[in-house]
Image (spheres, rainbow, N blue to C red):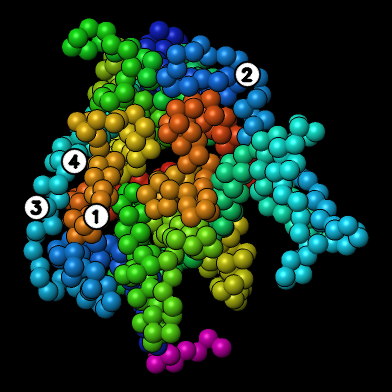
Amino acid sequence: MASKLTTSNAAGWAFALPGFGLICLFIVVPFFLAFALSLTNQRLISPNPTEYVGFANYKSLLSLAVITLEPERDEDGEIVRDEDGTPEYPRVRTITRNPDFPEYRGMREWFRWHSGDNARVVVASDVVFMKALVNTLTFALVIAPGQGGLALLLALLINQRLRGINIFRTIYFMPVVVSIVVVSLLWRFIYDGNDGLLNNLLSGLTFGLFEPIDWLGRTDTALGSIIAMSIWQAVGFHMVIWLAGLQTISPTLYEVAQIEGASKWQTFRYVTWPGLRNTAVLVLIVITMQAFALFAQIDVMTNGGPLDSTQTLVFQAVERGYGKQDISGGSTISVVLFLIVLTISLVQRYLTRERS
Amino acid sequence: MAVVSRDNRGLRLAVRYLVLVLVAVVFMFPLVFMIVSSLKPTQQLLSDTASLRAFLPVGDISLDNYFAAFARAPVGLFVFNSMLITIITVSASIFLCSLAAFSFVYLNWRGSGLVLSIALATLIIPFETIAIPLLLFVSRLPWIGMNGIEIGWLNTYHVQIIPWIADALTIFLFVQYFKDLPGELVEAARAEGASWWQIYRKVVMPLSGPVLATAAILKSLKMYNEQYLWPLIVVQDEAHRPIMVGLGYFFQLDVAWGEVMAYLSVITVPVLVFYLVLQRAFIASIASTGVKG
């Protein structure tokens, strides 16, 4: 638009180049570098020259297999059972360390289930990575609808015409301007198993019936606790985005709905929600992208524990790329992470596209 | 159906406010706890968590934790580092990104559309996916310093500044804003023989107050609050350490929670005050990332 008086190639480049050059150098270059490095054995500091290794890094990250174990049998062919009557199985390592099965070499058990008397064991070449992958997906899958939905509720709550409503808006947004690092530390104290505020609060509300829980120290509560805290910190951000969306809906539409005698739910369903379509896409994509970047909370609160129940992809990429100076391993996880983010945002865009 | 008695209306109003207040308590209590606790000795802080005293400045109130925190760690240095990094990055970002956006919107040059598309496409790349290759990259970059040419940017200020200056979101914000400015102003200035640089400085920038505030607020929050992963991996020495990484100091052998709360308050309260004073601009800046997207 605007001035097409003259074509100014030189001035145009000169003005755009500093900013664009920095983006190329520090975003585009490392982005392609990640792909290239993932095909090598590059280390941060190494006396040996870097070698091309093909897809070996991906193979050692992503390899999965299912092994069927038959129960141990005694001389009569009867299944050997322990005291509880559960069949006993040969150890997985009799297969993964067996030279007759080179394809399972170096793999470890991830999880198993039983079918009939047999046990099926899923083995992975990198169990920690698999756990990180599942945790990250779980985190994103819970937080995208959870945080997006709560933010919408808050936006509807704050969109009322009431005296002093701005004060509440200010308060709800407040955690957004507090660093996630600070918030994580603060909540480490709130979640503490002994003197934690949350335990004290719950035991106060139940008159002492509630048994204190070490929220971050248990495999079944740690990730959930981090999810709840993350929502608490960021929900105000998306509340404001929903609010901006709500305010673009013409008041005339609401007047018409009122004249037609629409109920509150009908008004929301047929006036508000269609008007929020674009906002919904944006909120969903932004939350999902942030969810996959989960790192600070883990680093401050749990270090991936207990028992890898809060490992995440970024945490693993950093632990390998920086902690172990294994740049190629960290880059491989980064590429996998990027491909997941890309796929999900393309799918979200496709599912929420305008239907004509 | 529509008849609502006055009492009923009063009750409904009360319920509405009750809900609003309860939600407000949920968002407030950790922050109140943080600030109140920073004034208490660790022993009292821990015992107070058993009751509502946790949220009240009662008992043995003093600033001792603050003095202890400053004695334990170079808190002043960390705050200075973060401020320096934030101020330089934000200023440079606003200048270079607005300049680029100005070029994309007003200067009709060959390839500008493609270049803008490439810049905006980087929005899809989360920083976390390039951190590790970028670490290797900056560890091999040259720098001209006091002692001539050095290789490697690790443990410096500039490694925390230069990669963060240009970003797609800031360019996008300026592009959106410039597109909505009346183009006639630029054309008139151009017809009078003003140079592009003069138009940028004298015509467009003076009209850009709102977008400047938005870009500055978003970028400042990013640089001051969210710089954690990157400095963690590129800065090991204390001299260049920013505040969020400096927290590690308080988790050595014994965790003195009173001091931790004091440190957290030192780094958080200024931002909160800033927010409360400028809250309209803060909220407008977040909103503007959404509406036009």
Name which residue lies at 66% across and 43% down.
A108
Other-residue count near label 4 (Cα within 10 Å), few / some / many at <14 / 14–19 / ≥20 = some
Which of pointers 3 and 4 indicates the residue nearer the eye?
A: 3
- Seen from the viewer's position, the closer of residues A50 and A15 is A50
Q: What element carries label 1?
A: loop
Name the residue that disc number 1 marks: B254
Question: What's the CA distance linking mark 2 and mark 4?
Answer: 44 Å
In primary-sequence order, the first of circles 3 and 1 is 3
Tell me where residue B271 appears, x and y as whole percent: 23, 49
Q: In this view, does A274 lie above or below B132?
A: below
Tell me where residue A132 appears, x and y as whole percent: 56, 45
Q: Which chain carries label 4?
A: B
Name the residue that disc number 3 marks: B67
Q: In this view, does B73 lie above or below B91?
A: below
Q: Residue B79 carries which label?
A: 4
Q: Which mark is residue A53?
A: 2
Which of pointers 2 and 4 indicates the residue nearer the eye?
A: 2
